[in-house]
Image (cartoon, grey):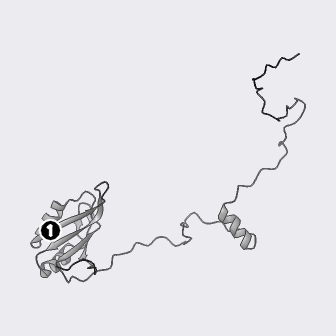
Amino acid sequence: MKSHSPGRHSRRARGGSRRRSDQRPRYQNARPKAPKKTFWQRLAAFFGNGETAKKPASASRNGSQQPRVSRKPEPVEVTSPRLYVGNLSFDATESDLFELFNGVGHVQNAEVVSYRHNQRSKGFAFVQMQTVEEAKRAVEELHDKEFLGRKLVVSGAKTSEHQPRE
């Protein structure tokens, strides 16, 4: 006779069945399940003709299947002494830019744009030259020049309406 003390639970889950050795496992002859469809596949099957097209591995999240094309920044005409410097190395400092642009003309200010929370460079900067002519010369000489392992993009800085013009 088995003794069962109150408060102790059996190892078997409640309501579970005990299998005898002469019985086969329940799912032995079950066919293998197909991989579970994603929400979007089920949605496409519901609205479509029931067939879901497999997305190629090269397709991106937004569904476009063309490879990503690198965009060249649009050249901005130099109308002020303020210049945009893009594709800047993350190791570049304001003093590096000051020295680089001082070889072309007199630099008033060089500012590397960085994130507030960790002070890491965003990869672009603004340089303020003395005159518009010096700024134009800097664009001619330094655009596509190799600097700290990267080709610089130098163009006139866009001016926005909410910034005061100097």
Neighbours of disc 1 within 10 Å: few (<14), some (14-19), many (20+): some
Left-right relation of 52 to 142: right
Judge whether 55 appears above or below 11 on screen.
Answer: below
Q: Name the residue under label 1.
A: 109
- Give residue 144's quadrant in the image: bottom left
User: What residue appears at the point 44 percent right and 73 percent down from the top-left corner?
Assistant: 69
Q: Is mark 1 on a helix, strand or loop?
A: strand
User: What residue appears at the point 73 percent right and 69 percent down from the top-left corner?
Assistant: 46
- Give residue 153's quadrant in the image: bottom left
User: What residue appears at the point 82 percent right and 20 percent down from the top-left corner?
Assistant: 4
| Horizontal and vertical percent position of residue 36 | 70, 56
> Which residue ends up furthest to the front in the rendered image?
6
> Which residue ends up furthest to the right in the rendered image?
22
Judge whether 6 appears above or below 38 on screen.
Answer: above
| Horizontal and vertical percent position of residue 49 | 75, 73
| Horizontal and vertical percent position of residue 85 | 24, 70
| Horizontal and vertical percent position of residue 52 | 70, 68
57 or 159: which is nearer to us? 159
Left-right relation of 108 to 67: left
> Which residue ends up furthest to the left in the rendered image?
106
Q: Quadrant of the N terminus?
A: top right
Q: Quadrant of the C terminus?
A: bottom left
User: What residue appears at the point 31 percent right and 54 percent down from the top-left corner?
Assistant: 118
